[in-house]
Image (tube, grey):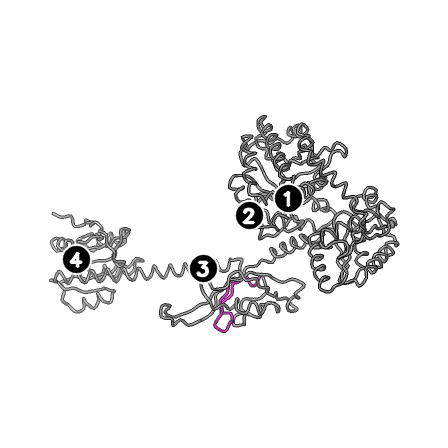
Amino acid sequence: MTNPTQSLVFPLGNWRDPARPTELTRDSILVVDDEPRLRESTVLLLAHEGREITQCGTGTEALALIEQRDVDLILLDLNLPDISGIEVMAHLRRLPSKATVIVISADRQIDSAIQSLRNGVYEFLRKPFKPEQLERVVENALHERRLVHSHTLMSARLEQSEHLHRFLVDQSPDIIYTLDEQGCFLFISGRVESLLGFDRKELIGKHFSSLLHDEDREVAAFAFAERRTGDRSSNNIEVRLRRKENNGYLHFDSRLIVTILSATGLYEGPQNRGEQRFVGTYGVARDITERKRAEELVSFHAYHDQLTGLPNRTLFRDRLTVALRQSKRRENVVAIVFLDLDRFKLVNDTYGHAEGDRLLKSFAERLSAQLRAGDTLARQGGDEFTIILPDLVRIDDAATIGEKIVEAMRAPFIVAEQEFVATVSMGISVFPKDGDSPEALIRNADLAMYHIKKSGKNSLAFFTEEMSQGQWDRIALENDLRRAHERGEFELAYQPQISVARTRMIGMEALLRWRHPKLGLLDPSHFLALAEEAGFINAISDWVLNEACRQLAVWHAIGHRGLRMSVNLSPREFERDDIVERVTSAIGRHQLAPGALEVEITENLLLQDADRVIDKVRTLRRCGVHVAIDDFGTRYSSLNYLRRFPVSSIKIDQSFIHTLAADAGVASIIRAFVGIADGFSLHLVAEGVETSAQVAALQDLGCDIMQGYHFLQPSKAQIVEDLLLTYPAVAE
């Protein structure tokens, strides 16, 4: 005899109908009838893949099963031996899980049907019934139940998705907005409140132009209310937004918000029929104010002297080039003044660099006051300044301005609370008489200035051909340089790069020296430019690469395997196609890992044939060689070039380190450098560190790797090995 309470599970097939049960869901059916044979026949009739059918013979058993498990469909007889089907349905209505009920009964009373319908029955079938009728009713009931469940699930997911989307929008650091077809705000995210000071509600219905800076209205008119879509839509358009304050908008030269804007048009209607109607714009505005400030700060210092704020050499040469072109068209005279502050070294040695810096700034201010509005005053470095005097009618006009400068310097400066009378030595060259290029004019003005220096200072002199006699000395030096390699007069000094936090020596910079038989030990500033001009630089670079790799191999062999060697390469080297092969050959010759060598290039290299240089730098990086930008921040520190050049390190120029304590703005610059290095995943090295105070300040700013006299001046290999005992170079 069949057990009145039992379950039959039918296997699932590869059913594709989304309204049918999947492999993860089954339709649960409960057959409740006191006639065993009818139950059995009903189970066999309804047997279908994906269905789980349970049967029982009493109302009590049915209620017990329903409380234990979820049931989708109940086939219920009204006349049961213990309690009626009406009572079962009444109990079901009190349960949280609602099953669909189909009544199958021989009861022909109309009241039974009415009570069943009042209890929410899905269908009322009278016995006897046709099998296909039961199958159809059951399938319809299950199908409708699945649809209701699917709709409920979809609604819950949509609600969850809406909550998630709103959370992401509200928590986004960007301003997210939508506009109607007239350009008025339909929605704007809460970020506008913290960023611009507006209540988001007060912007709804207002035109987007109310947020724009006056000068950006034209450029942002199409970008903010973009109608285009896809690749043609606006992307990363730079727009300035105005902040709201209690007294109105902030002024342009005070605080404003710089954003990059991306927007796309919104349309409704069938896309494939070309009947879409523009309904508005969706856009995102990202705050890049701090990034722009950092870029502008770096850009300013690329073309201006950090101490005085005057144009630097690069900007001076650009302006001189323009002045010479204008002079050719106007057929007038341009004078170049090369000026040196006499006895400046005495101030530095007596009162210290801080007082010397204050004197230079005061000197620059007084000097600027003597010039015309169209003149250019620049600082070349140290105590040397240059001046462009354009649009002169007569050559003697330059002498008049020079004498005015000499006279202005008669008033004393205050240095360390003491009066100090500063005198100047000036050399003047004139275009076109003394040269037709910026280089020639600056060089000849420099020669004239040194002529005054030797003649007693505190005066001025025009360049003459006799002053160029010193060029013969240069030729003699060139001849000595040609034979220096053959005579073995080159040598390398080494200066370590220290990770202060880890107390480790992580790198070593190889620095070239020339032990001249008459002039003594010369650093590259005395002969490198000459070597480049005379064509000796390639042979010198090959010697440096080979010697540096040889010494590094020695240090690795005695256990200092964590040490990396940095070698400076002239920009001229990257004009040759064999630079990569020469570097890798030196590495392979001494059986070093490519990552053990770092090639240092200067920012000047970025201004040359960028594409060719980038290809060579990339090839070096693919070979495993590290590449660093030396003297970063003094010339052309373009973030765009950093993005394109696959460099691994940047080295902060020592001029920033030397003025760190005296100039509060330098800390902001170095902090910007740290942020740039972090953003581009670059190593950052501070050069020229000389004091413990500088070490502490750099650590506070986030810079860990340092190089300078505080640790060790450039020294021979044997001396460096002693320092390795304090700062071991262990491979990690």
Are the residues tagged 1 and 2 within 8 Å (C-beta)?
no
Between discs 1 and 3, the one toward the N terminus = 3
Q: Amino acid at mark 3?
A: His
Q: Amino acid at mark 1?
A: Asp
Q: Which mark is residue 566?
A: none
In the rendered view, would you say 237 is above or below 343?
below
Between discs 4 and 2, the one toward the N terminus = 4
Farthest residue, direction bottom: 182
Q: Nearer the viewer, mark 1 or mark 2?
A: 2
Q: CA distance from mark 1 to mark 2?
A: 16 Å
Q: Nearer the viewer, mark 2 or mark 3?
A: 2
Q: Which residue is mark 1?
A: 630
Q: Which residue is mark 2?
A: 614
Magenta span of residues: 176-194
Between discs 4 and 1, the one toward the N terminus = 4
Between discs 1 and 2, the one toward the N terminus = 2
Categorize mark 3 by other alpha carbons within 10 Å: few (<14), some (14-19), many (20+): few
Q: CA distance from mark 4 to mark 2?
A: 90 Å
Element on which disc 1 rests: strand
Q: Which mark is residue 80?
A: 4
In the rendered view, would you say 719 is above or below 391?
above
Q: Which mark is residue 165?
A: 3
Whether residue 683 is visible here, answered yes or no, is no
